[in-house]
Image (spheres, rainbow, N blue to C red):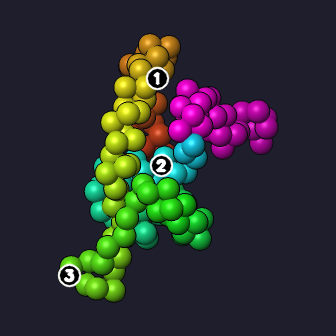
Amino acid sequence: MRKFEDSLPLQLLKAREATMAFFRPLLQENNITEQQWRVLRALKAYEELESKQLAEHCCILSPSLTGIIKRLEQQGYIKRKKSEEDQRRTLLSLTDKALGLFQRLSPDVESRYKAFTERYGEEKLEQLTRLLKDLTELET
């Protein structure tokens, strides 16, 4: 058995924490949790999603996502609408307030990505991204 310190799940958790240290202060300054930011980023990328799709994209369990959606809706960042094709389906999307948040935060997010890239190097980060994508394919 590998040493505890060398276990892959532990190393991945430590890497996540180190990565989030670059971004967490910016989120905290804007009263956004990491999970809320993930939801907002997914909706920015995909424009409209059902909550089940959103849960899958964000790696958040549906019961937890329900509370996150409710809080983001109360904050005025997301809105719901019925699908035109099927009135039983509810689609989530960003509000103008959320789009304004992205516009305001984009320069800071990009500068933090730049600092992260300068520290570790473009090539290493691309390699890491490829390896992590390979790992996630093990799940399917």
Alpha carbon distance from label 2 to label 1: 16 Å
- Mark 3 residue element: loop
Q: Amino acid at mark 1?
A: Arg
The residue lying at 34 percent from left, 42 percent from top is 100
Asked which secondary structure carries label 1, the reply is helix
In front here: 63 or 73? 73
Query: Which amino acid is tagged 3?
Result: Glu
What residue is pinned by disc 3? 85
Residue density around tag 1, few if under 14, some if 14–19, many if 20 or more, within 10 Å: some
Q: Earlier in the sequence, mark 1 or mark 3?
A: 3
- Residue 76, picture quadrant: bottom left
Label 3 with label 2: CB-CB less than 8 Å = no
Q: Residue at coordinates 51% horizontally, 62% vertically from top-left?
A: 74
Instruction: Tell me the distance, in whole angstroms, between the alpha carbons under discs 3 and 2.
Output: 27 Å
Residue bearing the label numbered 1: 112
Q: Which kind of residue does numbered mark 2 sit on?
A: Arg
The x, y position of residue 99, in whole percent, is 33, 46
Residue pointed to by mark 2: 38
Q: Position of residue 104 (x, y in %)?
A: 38, 33
Give the magenta part as a residue range.
1-30
Residue 62, numbered label: none
Residue 139 vertical position relative to residue 15 in the rendered view, above or below: below
